[in-house]
Image: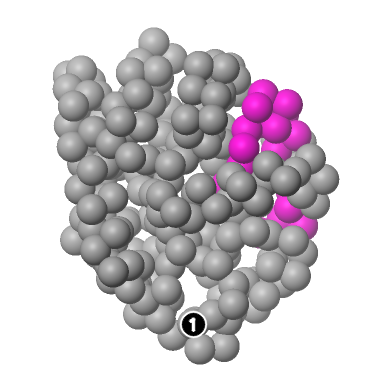
């Protein structure tokens, strides 16, 4: 089943790039730079103007070279629109049962945002594939480690504040992947069209993730 193949690819890469409010004219250049750097999944936040058109365009261009999904999805209606546009996964900052259900109904990867052990268990029981531990930097890598005792069977991915300085700690402490925004998708570099900086940073993240796993 394609969903499980995609899920394995996401975990193997370990790196989801959170692309928030990009210019439509730049999205393909941003994506190409990140994919070349080894990023396994691109998340376009749905608060971006023309987000669904971007998702559709990226999937048509990159096909199976990279997973493309929607982020900041707050409800089932937005999830369905993103899936219709070609999203491989649905990333949410919160836990919403209907969003998880509709994502699963159409065979896509569900990654809701959670914070507490109770939320983690409830979301996983509802059908989530990976749990987005948010905000990652505030909770810290030790929080992921502490959760591994009772909840180590549940795949977890911190997002929010993940950087080159802490990514290895998150992976070593049990994270299956990380979601990275501004540290990777540098607004200044994009504004100056220095896309090679995105590739360079992505390669650094991938290297640190692999080192942590070894």
Residue 94: in magenta span: yes
Viewer-nearest residue: 139 or 82: 82
Residue under pointer 1: 148
Image quarter of residue 171? bottom left
Left or right: 46, with 123 as reference point: left
List x then y, in percent, for residue 46. 56, 32
The answer to whether residue 135 is visible is no
Q: In which quarter of the image is the C terminus?
A: bottom left
Residue 95: in magenta span: yes
Viewer-nearest residue: 99 or 164: 164
> Is residue 94 positioned above or below 77 on the image?
below
The residue lying furthest to the bottom in this view is 149
List x then y, in percent, for residue 135. 43, 61
Residue depicted at 57% across the width and 63% down the height: 131
Left or right: 151, with 105 as reference point: left
List x then y, in percent, for residue 56. 60, 20
Residue depicted at 46% across the width and 63% down the height: 176
What's the magenta region?
79-100
């Amino acid at each position: 089943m394609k969903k499980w193949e995609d899920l394995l690819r996401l975990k193997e890469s370990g790196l989801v790039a959170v692309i928030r409010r990009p210019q439509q004219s730049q999205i393909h250049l941003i994506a190409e730079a990140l994919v070349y750097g080894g990023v396994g999944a691109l998340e376009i936040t749905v608060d971006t103007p023309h987000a669904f058109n971007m998702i559709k365009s990226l999937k048509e261009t990159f096909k199976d070279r990279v997973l493309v999904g929607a982020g900041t999805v707050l409800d089932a209606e937005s999830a369905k629109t993103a899936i219709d546009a070609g999203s491989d996964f649905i990333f949410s900052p919160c836990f919403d049962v209907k969003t998880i259900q509709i994502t699963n109904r159409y065979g896509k990867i569900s990654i809701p945002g959670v914070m507490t052990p109770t939320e983690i268990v409830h979301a996983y029981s509802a059908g989530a594939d990976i749990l987005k531990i948010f905000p990652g930097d505030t909770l810290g890598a030790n929080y992921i480690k502490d959760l591994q005792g009772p909840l180590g069977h549940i795949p977890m991915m911190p997002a929010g504040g993940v950087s080159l300085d802490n990514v290895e700690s998150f992976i070593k402490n049990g994270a299956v992947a990380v979601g990275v925004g501004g540290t990777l998708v540098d607004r200044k570099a994009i504004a100056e069209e220095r896309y090679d900086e995105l590739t360079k940073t992505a390669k650094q993240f991938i290297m640190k993730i692999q080192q942590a796993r070894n």
